[in-house]
Amino acid sequence: MSNRSAVGTASLFDPFALGGVELKNRAVMAPLTRSRAIGNLPNELHATYYGQRAGAGLIITEGVSPSPNGLGYPRIPGLFNEEQRAAWQAVTDAVHEKGGRIFMQFMHTGRVSHPANLPEGARVLAPSAVPLQSTKMWVDGEGELEIPVADAMTSDEVLEAIAEYVTAGRLAIEAGFDGVELHGANGYLIEQFIHPATNRREDEWGGSIQNRIRFALEVAGAVAAEIGRDRVGIRISPFGVFNEMPLYDEIEETYVALVRGLDEIGLAYVHVVDHSSMGTPEVPAPFKDRLSSIFGGAFILSGGYDFERANEDLEAGRGDLVAFGRAFLANPDLLTRFKLGAELNEPRPELFYTTGPEGYTDYPTL
Ligand SMILES: Cc1cc2nc3c(=O)[nH]c(=O)nc-3n(C[C@H](O)[C@H](O)[C@H](O)COP(=O)(O)O)c2cc1C
């Protein structure tokens, strides 16, 4: 249970103790896939980009796959071997040298994958073989392609996937990360297990609410046992519809049960996605409050925040931290700009997923 006061007095510039990690302020850089990882490896551009944004209290990296099978998008990074671990070290060094903190987001794409984006021998796996209807996938050199239906995981493959998250957790800590965030949102593997439309399994991993949330809880528990529960957070998107995840009757019950389970494990934080500012269904405010009240760790709010709304919600005790996505993408010195009341750079969406420094490391500071 949460001991967050009903009426807080926090502001975005206040420090915060997140699990065992001291954050210098309450502004989080939201996870942002940027597709610059040629060969699924971070490079010197990544170190520059994240180093530029070390003014955030906490940076959460772009989605990084803990498995060769989870690299479904072009040029997204991985963390499942030594070469990748060594490459990530330069990123954590760049952020720590500037007094920042950084968690890695583990994103396994599951069914949202094109096999042509996967390394040799990897496979598109999901809880069940449920095809995407209209979502297309970019493949370099080929363009937007239809996504072939994933193979349903065997129960051994489910256990292997959990083990991959655990190995990635260890590698992340070895590479200098302050912690990890499990991507349980936006229609990727963990949510594919949570959601009844994508999880049609009839074994202990599907069917009832307890069975559908089992994968999320097993991953969270196993990674927490490996690296410490205070170094593990999770991102969830109740009411999220991205990647063809329709609304369903038991959303609230499902997420209440999930967050109760996460609270028992004692994770450092729950990070709630609300993409209503991008035109999708909103997460009802009373429901967010309910999740926050049953979770004893930190609660991170995200989606469409500006400085004013962030402070309002922190002051009202609706969350402990606020994440900014597009604003951090376009403004490496976002906190300085907030402090001075300065204008913000506009993001350039046409360069979100391209290669090279343009639209990545060249947004100006004041
Ligand atoms: C270019 C781009 C890439 C994104 N990649 C991820 C990602 O890898 N993982 C994730 O959880 N969310 C991702 N998101 C969602 C953002 O973290 C955030 O929730 C969203 O942008 C809404 O917040 P904002 O209004 O502050 O931008 C992405 C959003 C954008 C615009």
Image: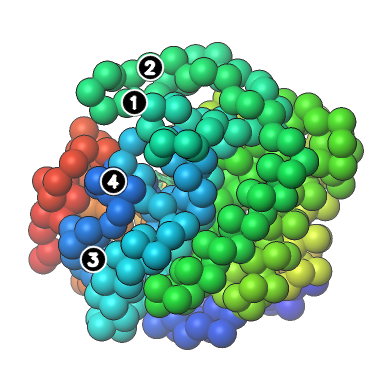
Pick the front one: 59 or 167: 167
Which numbered tag is attached to residue 62?
A: none
Q: Residues within 10 Å of mark 1 (few under 14, many from 20)?
A: some
Residue 290 screen position, x and y as percent: 75, 57
Query: Of residues 318 and 124, which is closer to you in this image?
Result: 124
**Which residue position holds label 2?**
145
Q: How is the image coloured?
A: rainbow
For the residue marked with disc 2, what is the amino acid? Answer: Leu
**Res. 234 image quadrant:** bottom right
Helix, strand or loop for disc 1:
strand
Label 1 – label 4 distance at C-alpha? 16 Å
Q: Which mark is residue 39?
A: 4
Residue 119 picture quarter = top left
Position in image of residue 54 (x %, y %): 29, 72
Q: Does any portion of residue 22 appear in the rendered image?
A: yes
Going by the numbered disc 3, the residue's amino acid type is Ala
Q: Residue at x 54, y 31 (%)?
A: 124
Crowd rating for badge 3 (residues with CA inside 10 Å; few <14, some 14–19, many 20+): many
For the point 19% across and 50% down, the residue is 360
Q: Quadrant of the N terminus?
A: bottom right
Q: Which residue is mark 1?
A: 138
**In the image, which disc is placed on residue 47?**
3
Q: Give the mark, 4 or 3, whose residue is nearer the N terminus.
A: 4
Q: Earlier in the sequence, mark 1 or mark 4?
A: 4
| Vertical order, 181 against 326 (above or below) | below
Callout 1 touching callout 2 (CB < 8 Å): yes
For the point 52% across and 18% down, the residue is 148
